[in-house]
Amino acid sequence: MTRTLRIKCNGTASLRPVIYIDGKAVKIKKNRFGNYLIEHKTEKDNAEVVIRQFPELSGRLWLIMALLFYFISIFGIFNPPYERRCLNIKCRFTVYLGEGNTDLSLVFRTNKAGGRALELNEGAPVEEFVNECTVDVRAKNRLRVVRVLQAIGWVALIVAAVMIISRYI
């Protein structure tokens, strides 16, 4: 018999988590209220859910990508801002599925680092393994470097503009 796990995630306004169910990344739909909705069909009695989020600046090619997007977006004007808090979210739990549809409601509580990343409001029985929200110190330091480089870029742009304008006046 096919069982359906339906997950609704609240409190995801500034988050872009990656969600895996049974080891496969699932497609996330966003409703008009900004909540994430996930529907997963399985034949098993339980489903392992893994939710991860890494800051954009924690990647391997962070400096190249930051500079590339800074120049492509016309000195950062059209570039969306980086997340200031640099949160690293790790959650892993097993949901025990009943017959038919199983609804699960999750609320992200990322206002305080060092605590739990999400709370389970209602739904199926869950066995929780990892549920933490930490600050990525390396990404926070990289964010400072990117901001300094952006300021240097703006100063260089203003100096170049003044030099070009003064040449023709």
Image: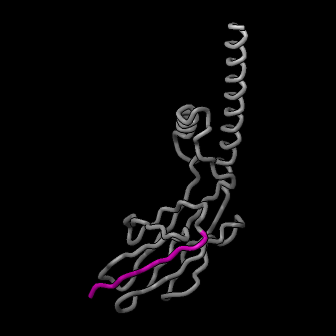
Nearest the viewer among 107 and 32 is 32
Question: Residue 56 location in percent, x, y?
Answer: 56, 49
Question: Residue 42 location in percent, x, y?
Answer: 32, 79
Question: Residue 87 location in percent, x, y?
Answer: 64, 58
Location of residue 78 with respect to 88 vertically, above or below: above
Task: Name the side, left or right, on which 161 lies relative to 41.
Answer: right
Location of residue 12 with respect to 61 vertically, above or below: below
Q: Residue at x 39, y 83 (%)?
A: 46
Q: Which of the image's four quarters has the C terminus?
A: top right
Task: Name the side, left or right, on which 4 lies relative to 78.
Answer: left
Quadrant assignment, res 145: top right
Q: Residue at x 62, y 68 (%)?
A: 132
Residue 143 is covered by the magenta coloring: no
**Numbered disc total:** 0
Task: Name the side, left or right, on which 54 lies relative to 152.
Answer: left
Q: Residue at x 68, y 17 (%)?
A: 160
Q: Residue at x 46, y 79 (%)?
A: 94
Q: Which of the image's four quarters has the N terminus?
A: bottom left
**In the image, farthest residue toward the left:** 1
Location of residue 47 with respect to 57 vertically, above or below: below
